[in-house]
Every structure is written in C-alpha cells, then in structure tokens.
Image (cartoon, rainbow, N blue to C red):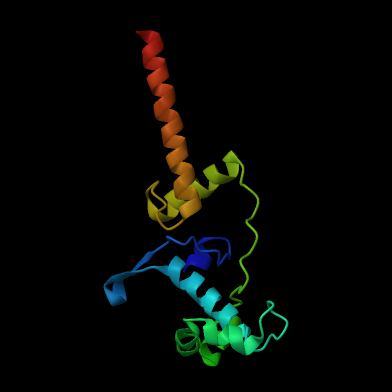
Amino acid sequence: LYRARNDGSCNVPNKFSVDVPEWASRVRLGEWVNKMRAYKQLLDVRTNSNAGKRPVEERVQSEPNFDEAASDLTPERIEALDSVRFPWEIERPRRHLTWEERYDELARHRVEHRNCEPTDNAQLLKWCEVQRHAMNKAMKETEEISE
C-alpha cells in the first residue's frame, strides 16, 4: 500500500502508520520496516565474517535482539520480502520535487480522494502544511499593511 502510493518507494518514514480496517487497528508501518531492516542486518552478521572487528560469534552472542530477530524474520519471510523487491538497505532520498510537481501530485490526490488532506503521503502532507503556513503568513502581512 505505501509503495503503491509513494512512487514505488519502501522508504517509509519511521512515524508512518496506517489504518487496517480488517484488524480494527492502526499499524506502525515505519517502525516495522525499520525493525525488519535491523533484524536482517543482525542476522547477516552470522554469515559475514568480515563485518566489524570482533569475531562473528562474539558479536552475535552479545546482541540482545538476536533471538527475537531470528524468530520474527524467518527465511520464508525474507524470501517473501525479497519477492516484492523490498530494499534491505535504505534508499537514498529522491530529489526534491518542484512546486509544480507537488501541485500536480496534490491535484491527482484531490481527484482520487476528493480532498486536499493527503494523510497517506507524508511528503505531500508536509508540502501542504508549508503552503498553508506561507499563505496564512502572507495574509497576515497583507492585513497589517492595509491597516
């Protein structure tokens, strides 16, 4: 869902959450994505003898979350995430969109959702907040000048 609405990116902001009606709850997707990446890194330590300066077994045993990582991120789950091309390394941020590109993105959102509150797109939502703030500031300044 996040990937479909954000140009194919799995760079989910850490605080991003989404309502899941089937579960009648809110899922903290950003936290989950970061946790899976951290678990994968931790699990990879076992197979990568060149990682870090301490011997592999010493690093693995000293990690308090290793057992949790191994039980939550099974080989089958890694394979499932790989099958949807889940990026295990954080992707570099994409270039900043121009004002016109963000405006077009908001216009598409308005057509699809009939509102200008893109709560499903953190970057666009932030852009809208900045635009509203700039408009309110300009209106205040105009009122002060006309008084």
State the image coordinates of residue 31 (x, y, percent, origin top left). 44, 68
State the image coordinates of residue 113 (x, y, percent, origin top left). 39, 54
Residue 42 versus residue 118 in the image, above or below: below
Q: Describe residue 63's horizontal placement relative to residue 46 as left or right.
A: left
Image quarter for residue 32? bottom left
Q: Which residue lies at the image location 60% right of the left edge and 74% below the top edge?
A: 88
Q: Which residue lies at the image location 64% right of the left edge and 86% below the top edge?
A: 56
Looking at the image, which is closer to me, 145 or 103? Answer: 145
State the image coordinates of residue 98 (x, y, percent, origin top left). 61, 42
Q: Residue furthest left?
A: 24
Q: Which residue lies at the image location 48% right of the left edge and 47% below the top edge?
A: 106
Looking at the image, which is closer to me, 120 or 68? Answer: 68
Image quarter for residue 139? top left
State the image coordinates of residue 75 (x, y, percent, origin top left). 55, 91
Q: Residue furthest right?
A: 50
Residue 70 versus residue 147 in the image, above or below: below
Q: In what quadrant of the picture does the C terminus appear? A: top left
Residue 78 versus residue 37 in the image, above or below: below
Q: Residue furthest top?
A: 147
Residue 50 versus residue 25 in the image, above or below: below
Looking at the image, which is closer to me, 75 or 25? Answer: 75
Q: Which residue lies at the image location 50% right of the left edge and 63% below the top edge?
A: 12
Q: Describe residue 144's horizontal placement relative to residue 126 as left or right.
A: left
Query: What is the total number of numbered labels drawn onto the structure image?
Result: 0
